Amino acid sequence: MPVLNRIAGLSEEMATWRQHLHQHPELGFDLHETADFVAARLREFGVDEIHTGIATTGIVAIINGQKDGPTVGLRADMDALPIVEETGADYASVNDGVMHACGHDGHTTMLLGAAKYLSETRNFAGRVALIFQPAEENGGGGGVMVEEGIMDRFDIEQVYALHNAPGFAEGHFFTTPGPIMAAVDTFHIHIKGVGGHGAMPHDSRDPVVAAVGIVQAIQTISSRNHYALDDLVISVTQIHTGSAENIIPETAYINGTVRTFDPEVQKMVMARMQEIVSGMGPAYGVTADLNYEVWYPATVNDADKTAFAATVARNVAGADNVVDDYPREMGAEDFSYMLNARPGAYLFLGAGPGAGLHQPGFNFNDRIAPVGASFFARVVETALPL
Ligand SMILES: [Zn+2]
Ligand SMILES: [Zn+2]
């Protein structure tokens, strides 16, 4: 079965919603206009319950089927990114320096399309929990919704989510059982030295040289301390220090990201980084402090639910258009918290050629919205047959 006819008929309406959301992007947990727009559409569709204000601006809406049965959770993220838009679209962002550069406008739209269809047709025995979350990009809104108890409160038994994937074949699905996205941590290193004249370094304690030494030493964690076949990325992405060519600064700041799958590898990185920072501060005659923050856990798909989701995806996209052994990625996703709470699956939906995620020229491909909405709708009808 290809895209559901009724959902194909919603294509233009979905593009209108998507472009409205695109034009009015919001950040993090502050998605008040976005959440109002979503709740207004859900009210129009006649869903049975709308619960707002979860994790600040998150929403869980319930659609009851024709008979009793379990509850399937479907997740969309709603937040945008702090990027200046360069798409040139006539519905480009009106909010300066904020844009939907990850396609969450499209994810929200796909779930709204499924909601409209499911509340019209209700060809299922059980309930759908439509989960619209804030702060996927930064802040772990999905984790906060889980902490606030949505899984128990709404009796959610299994969960599914999609992410659009530019550069992948349009309308094709990509997933894998087990780990699909990495755990992400961040680290901050603050170095305090003694500033001075650039011509008289012997009177200072130079934080610049200490920062360079620490960054070099951090590289040895992945090259020397861990087993080569375990997945690990450590990237130092920021060094901030200094103000002029003849001034040795007082302080330096280092920041970066760590990506792992295995909690043992993550523990090793934390321990080694602490040893490096604690040891190298005194070695350079400065003080160096590490603040290591554990962020999103790895996104781990349930094997059975992934096989089920791949079957549904084949029904929607065609038997040859679903990859169910897609290699895992070092990116991260806070749907991981929901998958830690309930079995389910996360899939990528190919968006065809175009600018990549988080680029100023990125724009969600409206043609894949009916495919994603049909997938969500068929997940429900297939998991909860009448
Ligand atoms: Zn993103
Ligand atoms: Zn995203």
Image (cartoon, grey):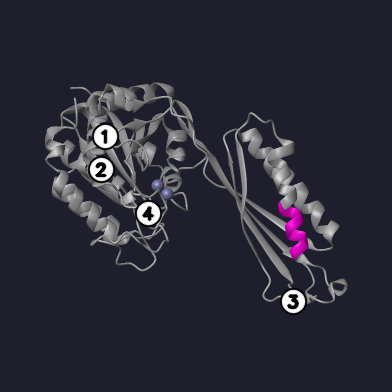
- Crowding at dot 1, Cα within 10 Å, few <14 / some 14-19 / many 20+, comes out as many
Residue at numbered disc 1:
376
Residue 157 visible from this viewpoint: no
Distance of label 4 from label 2 (alpha carbons): 16 Å
Amino acid bearing label 1: Phe
Left or right of 26? Residue 290 is: right
The answer to whether the beta carbon of the residue marked 3 is less than 8 Å from any atom of ligand 1 is no
- The span picked out in magenta is 208-215
- Crowding at dot 4, Cα within 10 Å, few <14 / some 14-19 / many 20+, comes out as many
Residue at numbered disc 2:
110
Badge nearest the viewer, 4 or 1? 4
The answer to whether the beta carbon of the residue marked 4 is less than 8 Å from any atom of ligand 1 is yes
Residue at numbered disc 4:
101
Q: Position of residue 70 (x, y in %)?
A: 29, 27
Distance of label 1 from label 3 (alpha carbons): 59 Å
- Residues at discs 1 and 2 in contact (Cβ within 8 Å): yes
First along the sequence among labels 1 and 2? 2
First along the sequence among labels 1 and 3? 3
